[in-house]
Image: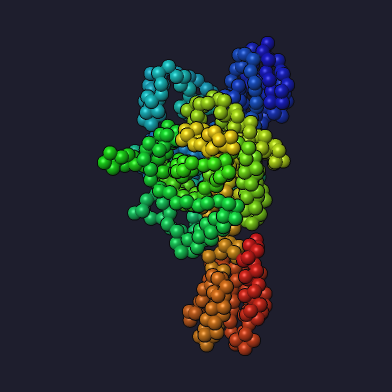
């Protein structure tokens, strides 16, 4: 007998050689029916996996976690591939992984799939599901694996196998007449899959390399219940309505162009207005809290990043080195090394600390062209960055001030659905994290203590720390239900050591400061993408690029409209005048499509009463007000940053 430690800490004894599915059945028949895979000592395995020794076991289901969903979706990707081969045996298969929301399969075929082809493909997938084919796993030595795939004329699979290390176990999964190279895990049979939907198709370079052949990719999703699929499709429609790339184009906020390059968006006047407001907003808040802002170059010598340690950990994500005579220069991926040198520019006293250095800094990271997306994932970004240089006895107070600033900003924007995450290192990952156990234990304990004393509800996440230290991440739930990081605050004992930073203490001796890295809005680019999707482009009045649109009914009312416009501009209200020779209904519809908060309709009655007819994008016509009264009303709304 062997002992199985379950997730709740209880112990279960089973016979050696029992499968994970056997354990699930022993726990309950209900669990066995919905189980998709399991984690055995942290490694994800099939339900068919045989247990040979004492271990820790977590059984996953579709509803329990992402691992459970991915096993379900991975199986459905094989059903998709099998259907592709049945419809067109000449198709060559590439890869078909599960992703965070469904799965895709890449394949090589001359003819592009049409909507009719997709309907036929879905129908074939349903047939395979109805056949309830058992799914079997087997392994082969490398030479036999290559031979099998060559016999099936699967050239992409052959290439993948050839790149595997010698001696590595090469596994395959078979269902009916179909066999695919795969590490798993998979369900026990095709009949376990229920509701399916092919979503969309796209081009994808083999192995993500632009030099390789362009393949076709089909994205899809599956669920255990038809009702869950319907709910998901409704969410996808909602996502389309909130897509910041589409809204950004419709509202003239930003653009991209192939002559500029992938991941390099350009802000148009209205988008630039929003960004300027955000920049001034956060800088003003920081100035009131004692921050001093600097400008530092977007370039630096490679030696700077070798000193900081970033070169070892981030060079693959940086743009190539530019050789300038004897110098090797790179575009910077982050700002902290520059700020270390700003601090080190002169000797500091304990009385000078804390020193808070902020910057709206441009950074560059070489993202794959296939992964860049609108403002959300870019190659050049502007960060709301700052570094606080503090004495050890000031850590708690300064960290709490950062948290207070985060909460104040979230109050201004109306953010409510967020959680605090303590991001720790993975102790076993010596590549990703700086190897100094003592430093890590000290930093993690310090940060945990701060969070506990602050009374913040938080959870811990191993493997999410920065390479130099633990951090507090604020995870916000978006309108589409995604969990994203916006603000972050990091504790760093390493970089002060590497840059030999010092301050003269009260005892006259030299001491090492501690650095707190923090970003409140994160990058302005990603923050704007988030705001666009949260508001669907209907920004609150204080943030809207055009706050008021003045709509004279006829040419005779234009002169009065200009006077109203001047009064608003005197109060720094962003206003536009639509004096085109168009019907008023047309002007109103256009202003609504532009999502302008206020529309002022001006006709004979308004001119006579020195008033404005007010329409809002939310409530429509709300009646007439004297001009001065409306000006006062909107100024107060902007000053209060009303939601």
Residue at the farthest left position: 325
Residue 533 horizontal/vertical position (percent): 56, 54
At 55% across and 47% down in the image, what residue appears? 356
**Can residue 24 be seen at all in this image of the molecule?**
yes
Q: Nearer the viewer, residue 151 or 202?
A: 202
State left or right for residue 331 relative to residue 194. left
Q: Position of residue 431 (x, y in %)?
A: 47, 28
Q: Is residue 127 visible?
A: no
Question: Which of the two residues, 110 or 524, is positioned nearer the viewer here?
Answer: 524
Residue farthest top in this picture: 1
Considering every residue shown, the one lying at the far front of the view is: 508
The answer to which of 73 and 246 lies nearer the viewer is: 246
Q: In the rendered view, would you say 585 is above or below 498?
A: below
Q: Quadrant of residue 283?
A: bottom right
327 horizontally vs 220: left or right:
left
Q: Residue at x 43, y 54 (%)?
A: 265
**Which residue appears at 38% of the width and 55% of the height?**
257
| Number of on-image labels | 0
Q: Is residue 398 above or below residue 428?
A: below
Query: Residue 504: x percent and y percent?
Result: 54, 37
Which coloring applies here? rainbow
Query: Is residue 640 placed above or below 237 in the rendered structure?
Result: below
> Which quarter of the figure is the N terminus placed in?
top right
The quarter holding residue 428 reads top right
Quadrant of the drawing holding the C terminus:
bottom right
523 or 436: which is nearer to us? 436
| Residue at left offset 44%, top offset 62% | 268
- In the rendered image, residue 93, in percent from the top left (x then y), is placed at 42, 34
């Amino acid at each position: 007998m062997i002992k199985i430690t379950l997730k709740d800490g209880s112990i279960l004894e089973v016979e050696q050689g029992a499968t994970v599915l056997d354990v699930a059945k022993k726990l309950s028949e209900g669990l066995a029916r919905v189980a998709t895979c399991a984690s055995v000592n942290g490694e994800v395995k099939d339900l068919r996996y045989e247990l040979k020794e004492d271990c820790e076991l977590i059984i996953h289901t579709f509803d329990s976690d992402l691992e459970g969903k991915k096993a379900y979706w991975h199986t459905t990707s094989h059903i998709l591939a099998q259907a592709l081969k049945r419809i067109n045996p000449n198709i060559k298969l590439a890869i078909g992984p599960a992703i965070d929301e469904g799965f895709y399969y890449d394949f090589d075929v001359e003819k592009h799939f049409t909507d009719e082809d997709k309907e036929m493909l879905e129908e074939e997938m349903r047939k395979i599901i109805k056949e309830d084919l058992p799914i079997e796993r087997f392994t082969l030595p490398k030479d036999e694996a290559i031979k099998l795939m060559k016999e099936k004329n699967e050239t992409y699979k052959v290439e993948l196998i050839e790149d595997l290390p010698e001696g590595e176990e090469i596994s395959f999964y078979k269902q009916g007449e179909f066999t695919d190279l795969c590490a798993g895990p998979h369900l026990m049979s095709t009949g376990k899959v229920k509701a399916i939907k092919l979503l969309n198709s796209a081009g994808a370079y083999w192995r993500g390399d632009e030099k390789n052949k362009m393949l076709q990719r089909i994205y899809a999703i599956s669920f255990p219940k038809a009702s869950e699929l319907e709910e998901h499709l409704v969410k996808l429609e909602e996502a389309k309505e909130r897509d910041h790339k589409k809204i950004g184009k419709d509202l003239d906020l930003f653009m991209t162009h192939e002559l500029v390059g992938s991941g390099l968006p350009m802000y148009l006047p209205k988008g630039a207005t929003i960004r300027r407001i955000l920049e001034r907003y956060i800088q003003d808040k920081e100035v009131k809290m004692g921050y001093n802002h600097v400008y530092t170059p977007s370039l630096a010598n490679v030696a700077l990043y070798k000193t900081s340690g970033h070169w070892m950990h981030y060079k693959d994500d940086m743009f190539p080195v530019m050789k300038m005579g004897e110098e090797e220069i790179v575009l910077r991926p982050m700002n902290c090394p520059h700020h270390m040198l700003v601090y080190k520019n002169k000797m500091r006293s304990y009385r000078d600390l804390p020193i808070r250095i902020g910057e709206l800094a441009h950074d560059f990271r070489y993202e794959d062209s296939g992964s860049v997306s609108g403002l959300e994932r870019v190659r050049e970004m502007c960060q709301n960055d700052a570094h606080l240089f503090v004495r050890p006895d000031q850590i708690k107070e300064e960290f709490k001030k950062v948290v207070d600033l985060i909460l104040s900003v979230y109050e201004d924007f109306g953010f409510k659905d967020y959680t605090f995450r303590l991001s720790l290192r993975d102790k076993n990952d010596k590549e990703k994290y700086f190897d100094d156990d003592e430093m890590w234990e000290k930093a993690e304990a310090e940060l945990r203590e701060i969070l506990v004393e602050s009374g913040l509800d938080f959870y811990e996440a191993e493997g999410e720390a920065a390479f130099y230290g633990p951090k507090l991440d604020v995870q916000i739930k978006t309108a589409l239900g995604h969990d994203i990081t916006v603000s972050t605050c990091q504790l760093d004992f390493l970089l002060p050591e590497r840059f030999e930073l010092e301050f003269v203490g009260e005892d006259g001796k030299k001491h090492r400061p501690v650095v707190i890295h923090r970003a409140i809005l994160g990058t302005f680019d990603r923050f704007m993408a988030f705001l666009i999707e949260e508001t669907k482009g209907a920004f609150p009045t204080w943030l809207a690029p055009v706050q008021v649109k003045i709509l004279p009914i006829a040419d005779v009312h234009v002169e009065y409209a200009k006077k109203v416009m001047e009064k608003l501009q005197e109060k720094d209200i962003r206003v536009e005048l639509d004096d085109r020779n168009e019907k008023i209904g047309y002007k109103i519809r256009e202003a609504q499509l532009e999502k302008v908060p206020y529309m002022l309709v001006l006709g004979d009655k308004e001119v006579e009463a020195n008033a404005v007819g007010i329409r809002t994008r939310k409530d429509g016509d709300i009646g007439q007000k004297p001009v001065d009264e409306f000006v006062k009303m909107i100024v107060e709304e902007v000053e209060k940053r009303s939601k």
